[in-house]
Image (cartoon, rainbow, N blue to C red):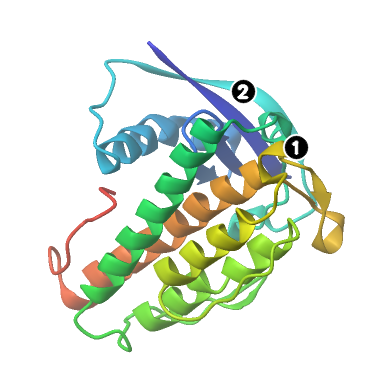
Amino acid sequence: MLYIRCVWEHNAHDTLLYAENIIGAFTRGTSLDEALNKMPREICSYLKWIGYGAPDDLKPVIVQEKESQLKISDADSDVLFDSEREVLTWCEYSSLKQLALKSAADFHRLYESIPDIKKSCLKERSTFYGSMPLTAEEMYFHTRNVNSYYFDEIGVTADNGGSILDCRIRGFKALERKPDYLSNTVYFGSYNEEWSLRKVLRRFVWHDRIHAKAMWRMAEKTFGHGSIPNIFCF
C-alpha cells in the first residue's frame, strides 16, 4: 500500500489536491471526492513518467487543508505545505532540482514535437491570469515565463531568456551562489504569499504538468490522435 499524503486547497466547491510526497502530482475537481478519485490515475501516470512502476494499491490521505479565496478552478494557488517549511539537505535539493530540470527538458521536447506551434483548435477563454494560452507557442512562453517570478519570490534574480530549460538552469546557478540557500527560508512574496525553496521546486513541476497536459491534449485534438509523443505519460 502506497499512502499518498494529500494537501487539499479549496474554494467553495472547487478543489486542488496535491500529493505532498509525490512532488508536483495533483488533481482538480468540483468536489474533494472528484479530485480524490482522480488521484490514483495521476500518481500512476506520474510514476511512469519518472520511470517507476505503479504500486498495487494507492490510498490518498488528507494531511493538510487550506481554504483559499483564489480561483482554484483555474489552478490559482497560494498554499505552502507544512512540509515545505523544513530545512533541505543537499541530497534532497539535488534530487528535487534534477526533477525540475527533467520536467523542463521534457516540456521542451513536447513543444518541439508539435507540428505547428501557432495552430490550435481551442476556443478562447479567460482565466485569472488573462486569456488562456491556446497554441503550443503561447503555452510554452507562459510556462517558461514563470521562471523569474518563482525565483524572485525567494530572493533570487533570474530571467526568462532562451529555452525553459536554459533559464531554469541559470536560475538554479544563481540560487546556489547564496551561501544559505539550503536553510529553506520562508519568504513573504507577492500578495503576501508564503514561499520557500521547497515550494519553488514543487511549483515548477506542478506548473509544467498543468501546461504539458494542456499542450498534449490540444495537439491530440488539433493534429490527430497519436500525432505527438506522450512524453509525460498522461
Q: Which residue ends up furthest to the top in the rendered image? A: 1
Residue drawn at 17 percent across, 67 percent down: 228
Nearest the viewer among 150 and 30 is: 150
Q: Residue 62 bears which disc, if any?
A: 2
Image coordinates of residue 130 in percent, x first then y, are 63, 79
The residue tagged 1 is 66
Image coordinates of residue 114 in percent, x first then y, are 23, 76
Can residue 26 be spotted in the picture? no
Residue drawn at 56 percent across, 31 percent down: 20
**Classed neighbour count for the residue bearing mark 1: other residues with Cα under 10 Å, few (<14), some (14–19), many (≥20):** some
Q: In which quarter of the image is residue 38?
A: top left
The amino acid type, in three-letter code, at marker 2 is Ile
Nearest the viewer among 201 and 5 is: 201
Image coordinates of residue 66 in percent, x first then y, are 75, 37
> Which quarter of the rendered picture does the N terminus lie within?
top left
Image coordinates of residue 212 in percent, x first then y, are 37, 61
Q: Quick check: 211 left or right of 200?
A: left
Q: Quick check: 85 left or right of 202?
A: right
Is residue 153 placed above or below 10 in the rendered structure? below
Residue drawn at 19 percent across, 81 percent down: 115
Q: How many marks?
A: 2
Is residue 119 placed above or below 192 in the rendered structure? below
Is residue 170 placed above or below 21 in the rendered structure? below
Whole-Å distance between the Cαs marked 1 and 2?
Answer: 11 Å
The amino acid type, in three-letter code, at marker 1 is Lys
